[in-house]
Amino acid sequence: MRRFNYIDLVLWLFRIGIIGVVLWGMTGKFILGIGNDYTISDWLDFFVSGLSQGSLYALIALGYTMVYGVLFMINFAHGEFFMAGAMTSTVLVALPLENAGYVERFPWLSLLAIFLSAVLTSVLVAVLTERIAYRPLRNAPRLVPLITAIGASFFWQYYFRGLFGSSLLPFPEFPMFDGKIAFWGLDFQKADIAVILTSLVVMFGLQQFVQRTKTGRAIRAVAENKDAATLMGIDVNRTITITFIVGASMAGVAGVLYSIVFRQLNFVMGFIPGIKAFTAAVLGGIGSIPGAALGGLFLGIIEAIGPPLFLEGLGVAGSHQLKDVIAFTMLVLVLIFRPQGIIGERLAEKKA
Amino acid sequence: MNEELRGTIKTGLIAGVVTLSLGMIGILVAFNKRFIVTDAVTLADLLLFGMAVIAGYLGASSLKEHSMGRRLLHGGLAGMLAAVPTFLLILLTLVWEGIRDSFINVEPALVSLLTLDNENVVVGGILLIVVFGVLGLVGVGYAQLPVRFRRPISMSLAWTIGSGVMSDILIGILRPRMSNDTLRSLFGSTGLQPVPFVVLFVLLTAVFFWWQQGGQTRYQTLRQNFTPRQQKSSRRVSISLLVIFLLILPSLLGVYLSEIFNEIGRFVLMGLGLNIAIGLAGLLDLGYVTNFAVGAYIMALLTSSSQFGPENPWSFWLAVPICVVAAMFTGFILALPVLKMRGDYLAIATLGFGEIIRVLARSDALKPVIGGAQGILQIPAAQIGGFMAQVMGYILNPINNLLSRFELGILATNSNGDIVFGNPPQLYYLFILASLLMLFISRRLNNSRTGRRWMAIREDEDVAAAMGINTTNAKVLAFTLSAASGGLAGAIFAAKLGSIFPSSFELLISINVLALIIVGGLGSIPGVIVGAFALVGIPQLLSEFAEFRLLLYGIALIGMMLVRPEGLWPSEVHRREIHSHGEDETAVPVSVKP
């Protein structure tokens, strides 16, 4: 046992401080009634939009977590895979299809084409990144791939800026995602519901893939022990590439879903969602697939209801601007206090 | 298809895809405006045709034992293949009218560059393939040269091209000191004139060849034969020459170049600070911008005469120590929670801190205190007044009178007898003073007991702890001291701009500083300066580069890690480490074990 030193004291103060802020904010909100007055349906709105945002984070987080599982590295460029898919499919498929009138006439087919092209681009970018920036450095010290990953992230951002320009791109409007839908007398944005459902289906499919197929088993074996996996006749390099491909496909799907919800794209769009998805992955226990899904949903919801729940009560002006602060504070808190994540995953023990 | 042919085809096509990318993201068109040889060769030509030469070189040198004929064949093939993807792009522009709506940089200028200005683009494209094939042969020829010729040629080519690219600066420096006619015979509007280019190239090749063939050894034996007294005095002479040079530099450079030097100085300051955390202690801190922001905001809050400043604004000199201490305090506070983390988790956590600070700085929540997105205005420039200025005036004015005969000068008093650090040449002295101070401190730290403690932690934290090093305290100290330099940079930055906005404190600053440390060499003090010149100076000098700066940083980070992980100017310790591992170049100082 280590002696209790001043660092521990500071960490305890930090914990108490955060809990204090949250409690004080909630007291201000509910007992003193500071800030806007929200009805139940407002809260539900926050919740559902948080859930849809969270499913996006979850989809991106899956890529982080899978790559971390097999390589023990933070793939900092993962947000860029997401951006690459969304931008390319918008510029090269969605907008031409819209101009030709196909989006109106065959919305589902166009959507399929957009998804396919996004996934393809994301996968291409991911495979290139892995081949050039990560594979040659597989045996280098841990920080080296992190540095190349940061490099790759900036490279792709500005590469796509060069290709498609730096202006905001509009994503075409799809009739089926427009407007609201009523459940139990409550209205929900159709786009939100579509995002939540799609990502649930995709995540379920991924879980089945990893648990049931031979390739999935190979991925799990490589995550467990690379040398032993090699001895069992698994091609480790190939498996790692497949992991990147699977993760990037999720990012591609997330890219299109993001475009459907926000309908505006830019070359920096991948950065913040990328970091938040990483937060989600750590939150759920990095290396764990269900953990990433839960972490994403949790982060999305906290981000959506946090500002009205405990920041407004503090009398903070423009509390919605501090959405990102909540996410990053969560990130720092998890890294400090529970690096193994909420659920706690075996992989985290090896590393923490 | 045999193995070697497949390899050559792969090389050629990769070079082709790179060439295509250069074109499609707009680098070629942007670089086509900068001449290296006036009205003849632009930077874009160099890149474009350079790719063909490289493809040919790689295509030929991957072959093992082969006849000259086979080599030429492979090199030529690789060169031609390097033009094929761009040729496909040209064909695509013919069928797809609206290509520019999607790929904004595929513009007529690019097509005419890629078709060698031919009217008929298909003919032009085929011509490009032929030219690339020929250049591939040139690459083979270069690969065939013995090393003792190859080295001097590539060195002098690099220097000649460099002076061609930097001709704007050379013109700026030479203009006041040279007649217009001489200048025009040397330089065009941009770039070197053809004759001086060739002369310079031949001259430099001869010099490098001589240096390599015996000059270097002769110089070294000369230095070795110095008596200790001679050594001492030669060092003294070179140091005083350096000091004089640094003092008169701004008058030599002029306003524009001084400003670039100030930018470099700002990043040298931050680099020296971050180098303590990353280079010495191995703590990958991605939130370094926090310290810079704290320094700048404290300076603004203490000296601004706007509503955010105090009632009686402080003087710059009193505020500077407060800024540094405040930055150190922030570094200390932010270090405490992250101490137990290692490696990549630490990086992400510090990145999180940096982002929190950025969002807070621009939010409405803190607007009453630090101005939100509108920032803080009316920060006065640093100045020396009163008695101090008078004393300094007595010293400076005679020197200035003497130097003005050579169109040179140093810091001077203004008409009121004050010394104001307002314009770039004056601010230069502030930056150089701060940088020299931090350089001195860094050097002393590097060689100190504390420095060695940090290096031990960098190499292996567990072992360091087992050797009796208090790793907690050492790491806290590293974060705290590394913050000081950032705070100083921020304070000077605020006084320089006169106003600060949250947009100046983006994550990009942290990445920028990280990139320059890595390019220069982790843990190396000269490396910080080299890195700052390469990554901050060059993009500032060449406006075409500015747009692609972060793209180049990305390439630099990946390329350095792959090819030269020890950096351009590695630290002594690190160089020794690499030599003790034999030819193992993959060793990198920041080894953090899982």
Image (cartoon, rainbow, N blue to C red):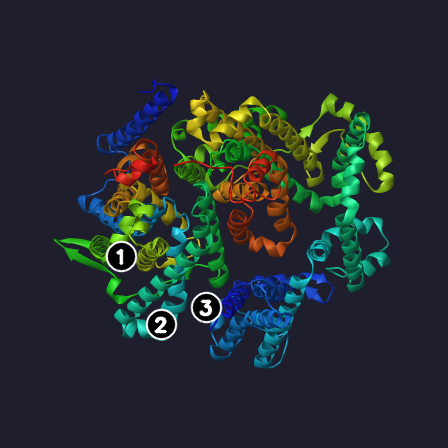
**Which residue, as the protein is rendered here, is positioned at the far left?**
A184
Quadrant (top left/top right/bottom left/bottom right) for the C terminus of chain B? top left
Which is in the foreground here, disc 1 or disc 2?
1
Residue under numbered circle 2:
A97
Residue drawn at the location 51% of the way across and 77% of the way down? B91
Q: Circle 3 sits in a helix, a strand or a loop, which is it?
A: helix
Q: Circle 1 sits in a helix, a strand or a loop, which is it?
A: helix
Chain letter belonging to callout 2: A
Which is in the foreground here, disc 3 or disc 1?
1
Label 1, label 2: how far apart the Cα atoms are: 35 Å
- To the question of a shared chain for discs 1 and 2, the answer is yes
Residue A132 on image: x %, y %: 46, 55
Q: Is residue A229 above or below residue B269?
A: below
Q: Nearer the viewer, residue B569 or A23?
A: B569
Residue under numbered circle 3:
B102
Chain letter belonging to callout 3: B
Residue drawn at the location 76% of the way across and 30% of the way down? B416
Camera sees residue B414? no
Q: Earlier in the sequence, mark 1 or mark 2?
A: 2
Residue A262 on image: x %, y %: 34, 56
Residue A44 on image: x %, y %: 20, 46
The amino acid marked with disc number 3 is: Ser
Chain letter belonging to callout 1: A
CA neighbours of label 1 inside 10 A, class few (<14), some (14 to 19), many (20+): some
CA neighbours of label 2 inside 10 A, class few (<14), some (14 to 19), many (20+): many
Residue under numbered circle 1:
A215
The amino acid marked with disc number 2 is: Leu
